[in-house]
Image: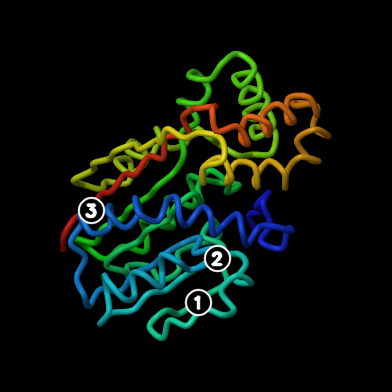
């Protein structure tokens, strides 16, 4: 089974994922709305997290259909009330959920964490019915790795070295289109979105929460030290500090029709 570095049971993970939902759900929603999914669609969301997107899709995109929401850990959806959402615990790396059984498949910020991204993408595609649509959203760390002042570039360089050691691919976003094309999907299109933010903003809070949770592992890895972590956290609290965040790459495609 795949293992996520940011386990749902970590202290503060519920708050961090809530911040992620606030920051990324609007982009995810816009992308889905542009695809014109049928109100009767059968939908699969992989890596549902706190279910903010699954619940929204059940209400706005497929109110007459069905949403299957899959995650390794369903501990954050215990109090979610969405009658047309079926929550399932499972690992997309091990196989499709229902081969050929879904009109629409989506996953966000999942593939860069999994042990075998190629297997996961193949299994996501295998769930599509003929003519079905898939939407994948994954990060590309390029903006922060080139646009920061030197001390912040040093921090992100250490972050990337740590992530590679942990099996996390923060450049996977740029590979989504060719990966989907290799499975014979059609009408492949994509965009990348980043954000300009300053200290004290929601993006700064998100990174502060993330780095605080991971600090022990980051420093223990030897890729970063306490001074670099402290410098980054100080910037996150400074409203005069402006920077750019990860480029989240959204790629959608269609399975060939019957």
Q: Mark 2, mark 3: which one is toward the viewer?
A: 2
Q: Which corner quadrant of the image does residue 163 belong to?
A: top right
Question: Which secondary structure, mark 3?
Answer: strand
The residue sitting at 41% across, 40% down in the picture is 248
The residue sitting at 36% across, 64% down in the picture is 127
* Nearer to us in this view, 17 or 233: 233
* Nearer to us in this view, 199 or 129: 199
Task: Say whether residue 181 is left or right of residue 198.
Answer: left
Instruction: Tell me how far mark 1 sits from mark 3, CA to CA.
Output: 25 Å
Is the C-beta separation of discs 2 and 1 under 8 Å?
A: yes
| Residue on which the image places disc 2 | 71
Residue 184 placed where, x, y %? 26, 46
Disc 3 crowd, CA 10 A, few/some/many (<14, 14-19, 20+): many
| Residue on which the image places disc 3 | 254
* Nearer to us in this view, 153 or 68: 153
Q: Quadrant of the C terminus?
A: bottom left
Labels 2 and 1: the sequence-earlier one: 2
């Amino acid at each position: 089974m795949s293992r996520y570095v940011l386990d749902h049971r970590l202290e503060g993970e519920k708050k961090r994922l809530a911040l992620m939902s606030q920051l990324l759900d609007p982009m995810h929603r816009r992308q889905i709305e542009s695809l014109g999914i049928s109100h009767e669609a059968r939908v699969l969301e992989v890596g549902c997290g706190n279910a903010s997107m699954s619940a929204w899709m059940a209400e706005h995109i497929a109110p007459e259909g069905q949403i299957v929401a899959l995650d390794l850990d369903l501990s954050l959806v215990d109090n979610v009330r969405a009658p047309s959402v079926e929550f399932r615990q499972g690992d997309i790396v091990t196989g499709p959920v229902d081969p050929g059984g879904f009109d629409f498949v989506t996953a966000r910020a999942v593939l860069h964490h999994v042990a075998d991204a190629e297997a996961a993408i193949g299994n996501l595609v295998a769930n599509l019915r003929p003519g079905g649509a898939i939407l994948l959203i994954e990060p590309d760390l390029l903006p922060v790795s080139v646009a920061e002042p030197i001390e912040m570039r040093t921090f992100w360089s250490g972050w990337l070295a740590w992530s590679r050691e942990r099996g996390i691919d923060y450049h996977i976003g740029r590979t989504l289109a060719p990966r989907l094309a290799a499975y014979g999907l059609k009408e492949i299109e994509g965009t990348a979105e980043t954000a300009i933010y300053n200290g004290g903003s929601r993006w700064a809070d998100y990174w502060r929460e993330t780095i605080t949770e991971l600090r022990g592992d980051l420093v223990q890895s030897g890729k970063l030290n306490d001074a670099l972590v402290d410098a980054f956290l100080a910037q996150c609290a400074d409203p005069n500090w402006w920077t750019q965040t990860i480029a989240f790459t959204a790629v959608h495609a269609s399975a060939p029709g019957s």
